[in-house]
Image: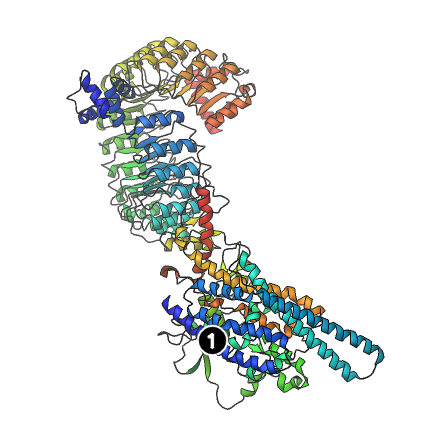
Amino acid sequence: METEDDLCKNNWGGASSSSSSKRREQVCFTSQHKWEDASILDYEMGMEEEPAFQENSNNNNGGQVNVDFLQGVRAQAWDPRTMLSNLSFMEEKIHELQDLVHLMVRRNGQLQGRQEQLVAQQQQLITTDLTSIIIQLISTAGSLLPSVKHHNMSTAPGPFTGSALFPYPREANNLASQTLNNNTCEFDLPKPIVVEERESHVVEEHEMKDEDDVEEGENLLPGSYEILQLEKEEILAPHTHFCTICGKGFKRDANLRMHMRGHGDEYKTPAALAKPNKEAAPGSEPMLIKRYSCPFPGCKRNKDHKKFQPLKTILCVKNHYKRTHCDKSFTCSRCHTKKFSVIADLKTHEKHCGKNKWLCSCGTTFSRKDKLFGHIALFQGHTPAIPLEETKPSAQRGSSACDNSNNNNNTGMVGFNLGSATNAIEEVAQPGFMDGKIRFEDSFSPLSFDTCNFGGFHEFPRPMFDDSESSFQMLISSACGFSPRNGGESVSNTSL
Amino acid sequence: MKKAKQVQHMISKPFDLLSEELVFIILDLVAQSPSDLKSFSLTCKWFYQVEARHRRSLKPLRAEYLPRILTRYRNTSDLDLTFCPRITDYALSVVGCLSGPTLRSVDLSRSFSFSAAGLLRLAVKCSSLVEIDLSNATEMRDAAAAVVAEAKSLERLKLGRCKKLTDMGIGCIAVGCRKLKRVSLKWCVGVGDLGVGLLAVKCKDLRSLDLSYLPITGKCLHDVLKLQHLEELLLQGCFGVDDDSLKSLTHHCNSLKNLDASSCQNLTQRGLTSLLSGAICLERLDLAHSSSVISLDFASSLNKVSSALQSIRLDGCSVTCDGLKAIGTLCISLREVSLSKCVTVTDEGLSCLVMKLKDLRKLDITCCRKLTGVSITQVANSCPLLVSLKMESCSLVSRDAFWLLGHKCRLLEELDFTDNEIDDEGLKSISSCRSLSSLKLGICLNITDRGLSYIGMSCSNLRELDLYRSVGITDIGISSIAQGCCHLETINISYCKDITDKSLVSLSKCSMLQTFESRGCPHITCQGLAAIAVRCKRLTKLDLKKCPFINDSGLLTLAHFSQGLKQISVSETGVTDVGLVSLANIGCLQNIAAVNTRGLSPSGVAAALVGCGGLRKAKLHASLRSLVPPSLITHMEARGCAFLWKDYNNHNNSNTLQEQAELDPKYWKLQLEEDIEL
């Protein structure tokens, strides 16, 4: 636990300090720009909260603290006075806009067919205003929403907390992408860009399937390759490629390049569309082999480990990190017990879920009876679990061992809720904005939604497991997921 | 308790000087007879209490009395509930609560209507439970087995015929009860390799494992034969155990003493060789009804185990002469050989076998119809230590052979001469076997009272005598037996048509008599029966079928005196409702057969059924089925009584012919042989 704490502190400290400095910089930047006073209010809010944020993160010494932290932020975010001023401001803004459009309508009648330049200008003006209103509305709602939820469900933070808190959290997360900083000024020029890019999570995730154990047998001499170590924020970021103009993130470079075409003709050239490393490939110097290190200290995949085994690709890093160092936040919708940290694993499991009818008291399920019996023969104290429809009064066994993992699961659930809530809102929100003829998410969503996901949930301490079981990763996942339910039911049943 | 003692002191203190330990020793001796124990405990309050403290084992007749009985006998360690067909969860929880800490053994093999909940109570409360018999719990499922697994100290477990049990349940038991020593899974057809394998992996103390009729293959035997202490392995009727699955089997199960591989149809010499490869200390081998021919090759598979082997069973196998010869030379220490129903056994083969086996104690050559006096002479000459000889239906054996047998084998205890040509001279020579305890002379048409009187004069240890259809026997023979054999427990005089009440009166001297079968003895009346009923207090089985003069008065006497009666057949007698209802007075009564008893009315049968609380089986005429209220039948079935409705009608046209056939043994035998040939 101690090491983990230290780690958390370090990471928090590092990330927040750098991000905060950057944020201030941006705030200054933007406030000088067109981005009108409307949004400054928001930014000020964000700045106000920063000390609190750091304060909390510094005494972050447990899973629960993170939740407290989120709640604390939310509590601060909800201020009736601010809300009122926001609302009245928006009202004013809308009236202004209304007047402007009235004016335009009248003028349009007079100046029909003339002055196309003027029309374009007007449109842009209205778009800008509308955008700022919508942003304002969302951030206001965002500060309101979590506080409402807070009363019912303390663990589920609102989806827009992030947007209210960190207007540009992309920078906070992506320290590595330096180029973005140069173009931050572009951010406040939301353009109605129609992008062909359609992101399908399902397809993407399926392709993520890759075993980091594959290169287990690889024998590279130490030093013969270059070790890269990504920070965990990078690893957990859903997107790795970002548009330098609008900031939209992509999982693939190819998709980004497709997206870039929308930003102008200069991106449509074959050179711009070509694979970047193809140019480098014919280069005379042989590329140094790249291998990756897991940022988790003490991990076998960490470069400081005695028996360091490097990871082959970024994908391997991602899957490895999620599987081993993250909470298993995806629960199987069929059995509601088995949990996964990589969504592809969940999909694979769901294909077979229900077929695993052979159950051990430890919660592990097997698709084959002989596998279950092999498992039971191997471990002391594990018993075949009789299917529940048959069990009337089942024995109270096997439940106690896994009770302690219950709490950990709860913290894990926080992360899950964060993720799912935002996704859900994203889907719901989209059509509404579409009506407004603005591809809102193009300019905005990467900023807000992505950050929401990472409101710090990966900082939660991992559940601790018995040493005896740690060698079986699958066992662990189910050991904590399955048995509490099993135990609970059996206990209730035993009352004769 | 102390108070009671003080009270005792105050009064007369007749047993002041008698310590409890001394009384316990007396009670150990008295305990042989339940009625004596009863008298003892009724002597005085102190005796009553001492007896209650002394008794360890209980066999209650009714589950309703369990609370009272267990409150009285607080030290009960063995509880046999076989007389209580209906044991509810409540009853089990009563058992758990009242004698939880002391209880070591429970027999639920004949009981039903308990569930996992009750078993859980039992398993949790009875912390020192060592033995539990759950055989015939055909409705028991894995959930209940998982509950049984809570009895951590369990050592002996019987789960025979628990057909709904699967590997999962056995797996639970294997994990939960690590101290198991003896496990019987006979007929648990849902249990396979995995369950048995896990049992072998988890329960390292296993001594005995009964896997008969399980759908297992040789796979699990790899684990089973790794058990360090395994002594007994029963694989009867395991069709999945075949040569292929045993191919790679190598083991060093030195502890294995008893292996039963009978009726394993797919096990041939190859598989058997690997099965026996490591069992060098094997003493008993059962290969009955094996599919392979017991030839020279086959005998070679016994090479490894030949030194210690003491008993071999080859019932129903096709045995060759060479094979027997080889077994004789290989396994010289054999003491028991069973060749029952090996129709191919010849005089030569058996002679070669027994010639080598000087130590032979038991020989079973039932239905080896080719054998003649030659082999019996050889047996008599080679095996002076013979104790048991079963040679039913060896009808070619001449009369002289029996002579020699009696002269040479003086240690004989058990003899089965059913359907043989033995005559009075043979019996005379046999009578020199003083320790003879069981003699079966069924369908021996050559014997008369004279021969039987030799037996009666010298064989005072006789316990069992079978004279079924030995028509030469009359009252004189029986009375000489009754006079000389006072330990007689079982006698069958069925279809000895000359037997009258005199025999019964003389047999009533045998106070140990438990089983009395007098089916088809037309001269027997209630007076003879009364004599038996009054004096043979231990009578448990009584067959009075086709004794037309038996009527209600006989049953009334029985009901009054034979309180230990468990089984009675009054089919085709003169019994009416009154007699049948009076049987309800007998608390232990379990089986009643009353078919074609003309005096019975439906209401009388119904009353009798309701009255007999412990009834397990009722064999009645099919016509009664529709006449007895259906609700009564369901009630009886819920109490644990099974009905057998018989439909044969004795009043058809061939009635006289049949009766003739039944009473004329020669005609009957002829007809039987015809039937067999058909």
Q: Is residue B497 visible?
A: yes
Closest to the observer: A34 or B376? A34
Q: Position of residue B226 (x, y in %)?
A: 32, 51
Q: Position of residue B272 (x, y in %)?
A: 35, 48
Tell me: residue A22, above or below residue B14.
below
Closest to the observer: A152 or B441? A152
Tell me: residue A274, above or below residue B265.
below
Q: Residue furthest bottom?
A: A284
Q: Amino acid at mark 1?
A: Ala
Q: Is residue A194 left or right of residue B268?
A: right
Q: Is residue B411 left or right of residue A118?
A: left
Location of residue A203 by image quarter: bottom right
Q: Is residue A411 left or right of residue B405?
A: right
Q: Position of residue B152 (x, y in %)?
A: 33, 43
Q: Position of residue B500 (x, y in %)?
A: 36, 10
Q: Is residue A166 visible?
A: no
Q: Residue at x 69, y 75 (%)?
A: A129
Q: Chain of mark 1?
A: A
Q: Residue at x 48, y 62 (%)?
A: A328
Tell me: residue A278, above or below residue A346.
below
Closest to the observer: A116 or A420? A116
Q: Is residue B170 left or right of residue B73?
A: right
Q: Residue at x 18, y 18 (%)?
A: B13
Determine whether the residue tagged by mark 1 lies in a helix, strand or loop: helix
Tell me: residue A284, above or below residue B322.
below
In what quadrant of the picture does the N terminus of chain B appear? top left
Q: Residue at x 78, y 73 (%)?
A: A102
Closest to the observer: A412 or A128? A128
Near mark 1 (Cα within 10 A), the count class, few <14, some 14-19 or many ≥20, is: some
Location of residue B417 by image quarter: top left
The residue beneath circle 1 is A15
